[in-house]
Image (cartoon, helix red, strand yellow):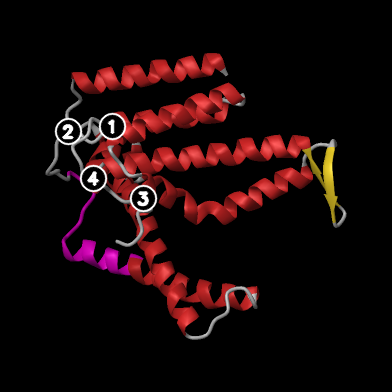
Amino acid sequence: MRSLFFTYIPGSSPLHILDPRTKIVAVMIASIVIFRSSSLTGIMCIGTVLLILFLISGVSYRVALASVRPMMVFLAIIFLMQLFMTGENAIFKLSGFKATWEGLHTGTLLITRFVYLLLFASLLTATTAPSMLTVGIERLLRPLPLRKTGISSFDLATMMSLSIHFVPLLHEKFEHLMDAQVSRGLDLKHDPFRTVHSLSVPMIRTALRSSEEVAFAMESRCYQGISRTSLFDPAIQKKDFLALSSFIALMWLILLLA
């Protein structure tokens, strides 16, 4: 794939060999700590932990950039909304709108949190094979009484795994679609409303067609979410307990510092 957005990068690093459940729980804990940290010290500590984890995993910095780049427009909109709609102490005024110091602080903190979440998610998918990720999610969901709601842990894990791995596929298709429309004379900057219509309609059709193809493929292979067996049977070992305990202790220390 041309894009490294949420894709698996094969390797044999200490993060690659950990049980998928260990990494999933670690990402959940990191997400809680990210939204609980509001001080500069806590944010810098989380960034340092992320940098160390990327170095340990051996995953290229291009993966980190690829996970953030598609969300830049969304992050910019959030930052501008916070900048011009929060607080009273003005930095400058622009066309009747007032940028404030409080908005600058809140917007920076908010987009930093989103970036950290994207980086942790990309590190999880980059060091965990799709099949192992599905098994890990299913094992974590198995104790829940999901059958009373008419769904099994296998179905829910499969849906979550497909959702995660549809993201890079759709992103790549969107890039191909945009290149095709530009080659047909579409000016992305001159007429934004026509651009949105020219890209969104075929993109929705592509997404629906792709999901339909996956559904047909699963049906043709007699997929059933009940009493499924798995090629992989992960087992939590001492290294997983040690890694998760160390990560929890580190996150707890960051919370105390924050």
Which label sits in the foreground, 1 or 3? 3
Relative placement, left or right, of 66 versus 85 is left
Element type where label 2 sits in the image: loop
Residue 134's place in the image compared with 1, above or below, is: above
- Kindly report the distance in space between the C-alpha atoms of the residues bearing marks 2 and 1: 9 Å
Q: Amino acid at mark 2?
A: Pro
Q: Amino acid at mark 3?
A: Phe
Q: Quadrant of the C terminus?
A: top right
Query: In this view of the protein, which residue sits in the foreground, 255 or 3?
Result: 3
- Kindly report the distance in space between the C-alpha atoms of the residues bearing marks 1 and 3: 18 Å
Tags 4 and 1 in contact by the CB under 8 Å rule? no
- What residue is pinned by disc 2? 234
Instruction: Specify which label sits upstream in the sequence, 4 or 3.
Output: 3
* Residue 76: image location, x then y, percent: 62, 51
- What residue is shown at x 43% (from left), y 79% (from top)? 180
Relative placement, left or right, of 32 versus 92 is left
Instruction: Specify which label sits upstream in the sequence, 4 or 1.
Output: 1
Instruction: Specify which label sits upstream in the sequence, 1 or 3.
Output: 3
Tags 2 and 4 in contact by the CB under 8 Å rule? no
- What residue is pinned by disc 1? 21
Residue 163's place in the image compared with 113, above or below, is: below
Tags 2 and 1 in contact by the CB under 8 Å rule? yes
- Kindly report the distance in space between the C-alpha atoms of the residues bearing marks 4 and 1: 12 Å
- What residue is shown at x 24% (from left), y 23% (from top)? 240
Asked if the magenta segment contains residue 216, the reply would be yes
Region rendered in magenta? 211-227
Asked if the magenta segment contains residue 36, the reply would be no
Q: Amino acid at mark 1?
A: Arg
- Kindly report the distance in space between the C-alpha atoms of the residues bearing marks 4 and 3: 11 Å
Numbered disc total: 4
- What residue is pinned by disc 3? 6
